[in-house]
Amino acid sequence: MKKWLISVLLVFAALSVSAQRYAYVDTDYILSHIPAYKAAQEKLNELSMEWQKQVEQLYGEVGEMRRKYQNEQVLLTPEMQDQRKEQIAAKEKMAQQLQKQYFGPQGAIFQRREELIKPIQSEVFTAIDEIASDDNYALVFDIAAGPIVIYTDPKYDISDEVLQLLGYKGNK
């Protein structure tokens, strides 16, 4: 009796699972077809390179100060040596603070990414949600996140539908 009950439950579970619909999207693919996203990425890359140059310049100055100190150390009094060490440490601290200000966890690059990219991503996820609701998908996977899904059947890829809903054209 127990085996029969378990068998019946397994059959019902299998039927309910097979009745669900699944789809997947490739958010990298979708975002790569949205011009505003490309422009935002380019702007972030420009800012990042500009800020990186500023940080590298400060670290270069620190390196130059150290090199000069090393060369002149024997000629300096102990007080002058301490003063130079303090100047070098202060300049290095300034470089570290600038690097953190630009590239830290809540730095300027993070904030600019939030301003420029988050609205686009939100629009994409809203479109995915709308398609999933309209087409009664139980789950929608994002294959851009990495090797989470081993195999996907292209007929379940709704990436181009998302692009169409957003008013863009894909090419899959």
Image: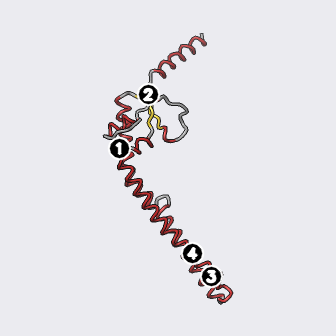
Residue at coordinates 43% horizontally, 41% vertically from top-left? 29
Q: Earlier in the sequence, mark 4 or mark 1?
A: 4
Foreground mark, 2 or 1, reads: 2
Crowd around label 1: few <14 · some 14–19 · many ≥20 (10 Å): few
Eye-nearest disc, 3 or 2: 2
The location of residue 170, given as percent across then percent down, is: 38, 38
Looking at the image, is 72 positioned above or below residue 46?
A: below
- CB contact under 8 Å: marks 3 and 4: no
Is 98 or 38 nearer to us in this picture?
38
What label sits on residue 62 in the rendered view? 4
Of 8 and 80, nearer the camera is 80
Dot 1 falls on a residue whose secondary structure is: helix
Q: Distance between the Cα atoms at labels 4 and 1? A: 45 Å
**Label 3, label 2: how far apart the Cα atoms are:** 67 Å
> In which quadrant will I find the N terminus?
top right
Residue named by callout 3: 69
